[in-house]
Amino acid sequence: METIILAVVIAVVVLGALGGLVVGSRRRRPLPPPPPSPPDITAPPAEPHVGEEAETPREETRRTIEEVDLPDASSPVVVEEPPVVEEIPAPAIEVPEPTAGRLVRLRARLSRSQNALGKGLLTLLSREHLDEDTWEEVEDTLLTADVGVQPTQELVERLRERVRVLGTRTPAELRTLLREELLTLVGTDVDRTVRTEPDGRKPGIVMVVGVNGTGKTTTTGKLARVLVADGRTVVLGAADTFRAAAADQLQTWGERVGAHTVRGPEAGDPASVAFDAVKEGKEMGVDVVLIDTAGRLHTKTGLMDELGKVKRVVEKHAPLDEVLLVLDATTGQNGLVQARVFAEVVDISGIVLTKLDGTAKGGIVVAVQRELGVPVKLIGLGEGADDLAPFEPEAFVDALIGD
């Protein structure tokens, strides 16, 4: 009996202990989490996790593949064409005015400036009595027109002799007499063609020289137009590397008539540019190479030596066919000083007188020919592109004495 009671007591104690454990475990609460650390102001915000910014899915009707309209295979497919880009046309090549008879067409412009010389001489020769004072006035008129001392004396002597033999002098006879003597003075038996067609080779090589301000680069460009008008192909050599924009100016002239321009760096070696121009002209098979040299003051020996160097370098390819000296007609006798110095450095073969329409001193044509022993081959009579004309003695003298 005692044994049963003892077993019951032990069982009750065991059950009570187990119940307490269960109740204790249910009442135990987890410790609160530690307080969050203060946010790092400098740290970038954390990137959102997947689904954090997801919105509530919208309810929309979904179409089945049977309900989707597919394009009809028979309907034409429209393809958009790319926009048309308009090409800017290249500048048209100009056709220069023919050179034949160009001076005749420019005669009116020449007459306006030179007519005073002829009229003055005709008025003096028409006097009833031609005494010594009258002949002195004739001399003064010729000298004022820059004919030069020696040519003036020769002309006056011939006029005095022919007037004495002629006796009576009608206006028509005087005009014929004066025209004949002026033509003799200017010279009609001289070859005035610009030599650009050497025998057995191409190209012809022409070098253009002159003092600053005479219009040398412009004359070179106009000469290219003269040659193109006569059916020649041309390469231009921009050997004037010392004057700003000289090469640009020459290239513009060339582009207008389709002539290629060879140029070098600014302040580069002019002889090198001239050499390359002749080389490219030979490779291209053109008819003429025109070389524009720097405008040099005749008082600067170093620059004149540079001009001689250009000539020597060019002649390594072939001899120069023409050396044209550009002179400003308005400078009168000063142009003769320039001409002498240039003639000592290079062999001048022809003269280009520019701005002849801007002076009444047309006698410079006679004076400069006498000074250098070479003919005037071209004259400039204005600012127009085709105002450079081959010199024609008859048209020139007719412009001097008028109708």
Image (cartoon, helix red, strand yellow):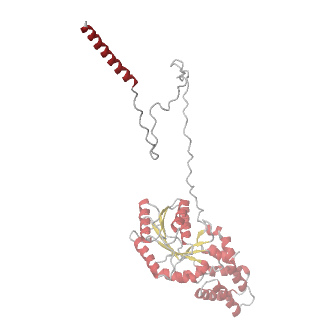
Residue in the picture at 62% in, 89% down: 157
Q: Position of residue 60 (x, y in %)?
A: 55, 22
Q: Is residue 178 above or below residue 280?
A: below
Q: Is residue 183 above or below residue 77?
A: below
Q: Position of residue 211 (x, y in %)?
A: 53, 77
Residue in the picture at 53% in, 26% down: 56
- Quick check: 353 left or right of 175? left
Residue in the picture at 55% in, 80% down: 369
- Rendered image quadrant of residue 106: bottom right
- Rendered image quadrant of residue 317: bottom left
Q: Residue furthest left?
A: 3
- Quick check: 271 left or right of 255? left
Q: Quadrant of the N terminus?
A: top left
Q: Position of residue 294 (x, y in %)?
A: 49, 73
- Quick check: 346 left or right of 76? left
Q: Residue furthest top?
A: 1
Q: Quadrant of the C terminus?
A: bottom right
In front of the other: 110 or 314: 314
Residue in the picture at 44% in, 79% down: 305
* Residue 164 visible to an observer of this rendering: yes
